[in-house]
Image (tube, grey):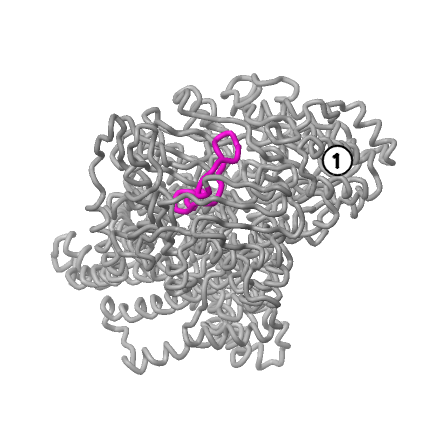
Amino acid sequence: MYTYIIKRLMGAVPVILGVIALVFILTTIVPGDPARLMMGQRGDPETIELIRKEFGLDKPLWYQFIDFFRRALTLDLGKSYRNNMLVTQAIIERIPVTAKLAAFSMGIAVILGVTFGIISAVKQYSWLDYGSMLVAMLGISAPGFWVGLLLIVLFCVKLGWIPGTGTGEGELIYYVLPSITLGVRPAALIARLTRSSMLEIIRQDYVRTARAKGLSERVVVLKHALRNAMIPVITIVGIQTAYFLSGAIITEQLFSLPGIGRLSVEALINRDFPIIRGVILFMALLFVMINLLVDLSYPLFDPRIKYE
Amino acid sequence: MLKRILAVILVLMLVAGVLAGCGGGQQATEEPAKEEQQVAEKKDGKYGGIFRKAIGANPPHLDPVHATDTTSAMIIYQIFETLVGLDSEGNLVPLLAESWESEDGKTFTFHLRKGVRFHKTIEGGTPTANGGREVTADDWVWTFNYICDPETKSPRAYFLDMIKGYKDYREGKVDHLPGVRKIDDYTLEIELEYPYTPFISVLAYNAFNVLPKEDVEKWGDEFNFHPVGTGPFKFEEWVQDEKVVLSRNENYWMKDEEGNQLPYLDGIEFRVIVDHTVRWTEFNMGNFDGMQEVDDPYYHEAKEKYGDSFQERPMMGTYYYGMNVELEPWKGNKKLRQAMNYAIDREAMIDLVKNGRATPAKGVLPPGMFAYNPDLKGYSYDPEKAKELLKEAGYPDGINITLQYNTSDGHKRIAEALQQQYKAVGINMDIKNVDWGAHLDSVERSEVPLFRMGWVVDYPDPDNFLYVLLHSDNRGPQGNYTRFSNPKFDELTAKARVETDQEIRKKLYQEAEQIVVEEAPWVFIYHYTTHVLNQPYVKGYKLPSFGEYSAKYTKVWLDK
Amino acid sequence: METRPDLQKETTVTKTKNKKREGRSLWMDGWIRLKKNKLAMFGLYLVIIIVLAALFAPFITKYDPYTQLIWTEGRAAQLSPPSAKHWFGTDVYGRDIFTRVIYGARISLQIGIASVLISVLIGVPLGAIAGYYGGLVDDVISWLINVIFAFPFLLFVLAIVAYLPPSLIIMYVAIGVVNWASIARVVRGQVLSVKEKEYVEAANALGSSDFRVIFKHILPNVLAPVIVQATLRVGNVIMLEAALSFLGFGVQPPEPSWGYMINQGRQFLLAGKWWWSVFPGIAIMMLVLGFNLLGDGLRDALDPRLKQ
């Protein structure tokens, strides 16, 4: 088990190094001078030069790359060009909001997705099946920001159930709409996957045996089938969590949530390269960790899987 | 078995929960600040309370020395103060200097206000390093030295490059700025290299506030996150991308006419809501007392619904499409540039796309600006003339051009409308957007023949328009993006800089402007308006002609 | 936001196992199965209808998608509600929204198909090479795939689209370059499993060239999962364009892109002018739904295991 973890972590090292290289390339080949941008619409060349020097932009590219690489390995990500905040601090400040959003939207996705997936599978080809699968498909087919806006109009303006966007004084009710907006898609994916793997499993011998033994349908479904059906679901949860940032960018923008997604878009627009590099590195690390966690959780559902 | 499944789900959620938990601690520290907010108390018929304002972006800087944008300025105006201020009509008024005089336009003497103190506490009662001491001429001398110090890297230091010895100081030849001197504790003298009439206006710019040396030195780079000034409001809290909270400065020097302590408000909370639609929605829900930027889609509704508390007025700024006169097809082709100006129906565009929220531009200078020329011979909509000029310019079969603008829905709407009008006279204008950074960069490198640009004054003087944006010395990042160069124009605007007689200056500027209009390096489109939307119970808010962002909340109160 | 259909790798990899059948009969069987699947056929019809509308746009509507009627007809033509004259109403410039929705199908289909094609063109050869040759080549390509996966994809696309001059081509390429990894991963897995088959080994033993083996024996087996993947991707890419529009980096006006229309019209939604945003919104949902249903159906149809 531990050797497996260590092996996996070692395997992640070249990937992370690749990400570092790629992010550096992306942020250096783009046109536009960050130092110039800090001057506002007008600036004098002398100060621009001073700022370039401060950012280390006057150094040759290869030097900048090695310097960045060296620092990144020690998690020294530098300071934001824009407001001089430490990149690590800027990211840490944003984590709580995004993490809550991730937890809630994934929670919604798993609960809704698994429930409707099972119902669909058990009642295959019924109107309930077609109905929930169609809703799931629509959930995947609607642009997130559009769904979010309609939710705001409905629940904030028309019904008045939700006080507004942002995070208020930290009340959880502010996370309801963004979490739904973000959870719809994984919920639909999970529902469809649960359905298809349930269908597959229901046909298998041991489930038939269980049925033949005279166990109630409920026990059969929940005890035997669901457990096996969870494996693809766990996979999708893992992958969606990692790819969650892309959705969070849109959702946080729409719901004025000060999370990682907002941080990265603002940084992108303002050429705040240290922040962009930091966020991408952070997300890549998270991706690796989550994938590892997901893999480690497989044996819980299928004792045949063991890591040595 | 099911338990184990649940356990795993729980574990996954816990992992996220633990991460989320980091925020718990932060919120706990917010609590004391919250308790301190007093319930709105009655002050001689005027209520306090917290003013909640929705803004469109997170300010990058609360340190005035490094700020270059209007969002930052909006908050800086509340925390910090300059020597001279602008009233809501754009006139210079005393602020931390009670009066000033100059005989030759070269040496200025400022008589400082007594009893002005730096903030004693910020951030929920934490004492500041300066201890709330009084501001004296020493502080001003230190502040100007600090701003102009190359180590500080202030992007606005060059605004002060006419101060005597600026260059020597920047180059390290002298260890202090010789032009700024203390006469006594309450008298400050500033000497310039040459007479420069708009100098007082420059001092009203929001970068040149007095700073407490102790706190700046204590925090260093971090001063941005712990700003200390003399203004009506003190810094309390800044959650990046979410909100900036200010509280009342109970030791503020200003009193109202009846002798009541100002400001009336207990505090201001600026909340960042990026999306226009959401901002407008939440304002309507009553979640805010004021909001920035009512976008065109909601304009009519806002006017109807809020009446007088939706204020708007012309603002000193001009929106234009620049034609780089060193690049094809504009190079040496005045007629083509003029055709560009004749081809567009500004009135119709403003009416239909901007809801009439702008003044058609005939020239460079906006109305309300000193030397604005109401009799200027500008361009009107004349598609026939445009076609004719196009033919004379050597393009009888029309021309293909590309407009570059920086990404924004507003610019996009205008460009789409003008695109259609140009098409009607045979000018096929493609439009492409790039982000602001790439836009500025490529425009300044003289790579873009046709580009959108706008200018809103830093200080209310034609110098900030004509000299800065069109004088050949300022080609490139300093402001002359079209690379316009005209010896006569250069001479006129340079002369007006040092001229002290306002009547003569006016003539010089008007003559210079007429040259620009004739040469047409710009497509003159419109002059901006500024606006603000407050709830009807907001009282005492005057919309400044300098722009909504420059409003001070000293005398604002809530009647609810 | 984004499905990562690569998670189907576990299922697809094993699919063609033990089925040595002629390519044609597989396709015929697939088609017969597809025809039985009502939802998939519904998806197919949706896609066909939209493709036809896009092709014959000028014959369907008498308006031009670019003509702004406000200059000739004044305010009456501005944001006029749906009527007999303008079925879907007009936008703020007095352009006919029905017309723009019809023409917009061209843009959405173009972006969807072109960028997926690019990712297929990159992904299939790289995946096949990696799977077939293994060893160092495989290591390098797999590493590249993992790096792309660990990179937050929306930030990747944004970084390219935001900083480079806007054009449809750049958008295809940006999206294609990000998407190839998931195609390559599927292909690689598939090739790995096919490679071990007796007939491939036999072909190798008979001295067929690698080229011939790959094209004649391996690629046909890989085609089915690639088609499924690609179909599902198209829907995602169309949604991605809408998300880019929301952030301000979508297709340039005056091209009638749906994402751009939804996003511009969105601001008028609250003012009661719902038609500018809602009709293109429905259009996008229908097209994405069509591709997703079709993709799902194809997966079921081309997966012989379900044929029981």
Against A299, residue C73 (above or below) is above
Residue C268 in view in this figure: yes
Against B453, residue A199 (above or below) is below
Identify the residue shown where x is 49% and y is 65%.
C148
* Residue B205 position within the rendered picture, expressed as x and y whole percent measured from the top left: 52, 44
Residue C215 is left or right of residue A287, and the answer is right
Residue C113 is left or right of residue A200, and the answer is right
Residue A27 is left or right of residue B404, and the answer is left
Q: Quadrant of the C terminus of chain B?
A: top left
Kind of residue at badge 1: Ala
State yes or no: residue B85 in magenta. yes
* Residue C9 position within the rendered picture, expressed as x and y whole percent measured from the top left: 42, 64
Identify the residue shown where x is 19% and y is 55%.
A221
Identify the residue shown where x is 52% and y is 75%.
A67
Callout 1: few (<14), some (14-19), or many (20+) C-alpha neighbours within 10 Å? Answer: many
Region rendered in magenta: B74-97
Foreground of the two, C216 or B262? B262
State yes or no: residue B555 in magenta. no
Q: Quadrant of residue B334?
A: top right
- Residue that badge 1 annotates: B512
* Residue B197 position within the rendered picture, expressed as x and y whole percent measured from the top left: 63, 41
Against A116, residue B320 (above or below) is above
Against A8, residue B372 (above or below) is above
* Residue B412 position within the rendered picture, expressed as x and y whole percent measured from the top left: 59, 37
Identify the residue shown where x is 33% and y is 53%.
B133
Which residue extends farthest front?
B184
Q: Regarding mark 1 in the picture, which secondary structure is present there?
A: helix
Q: Quadrant of the N terminus of chain B?
A: bottom left
Residue C298 in view in this figure: no
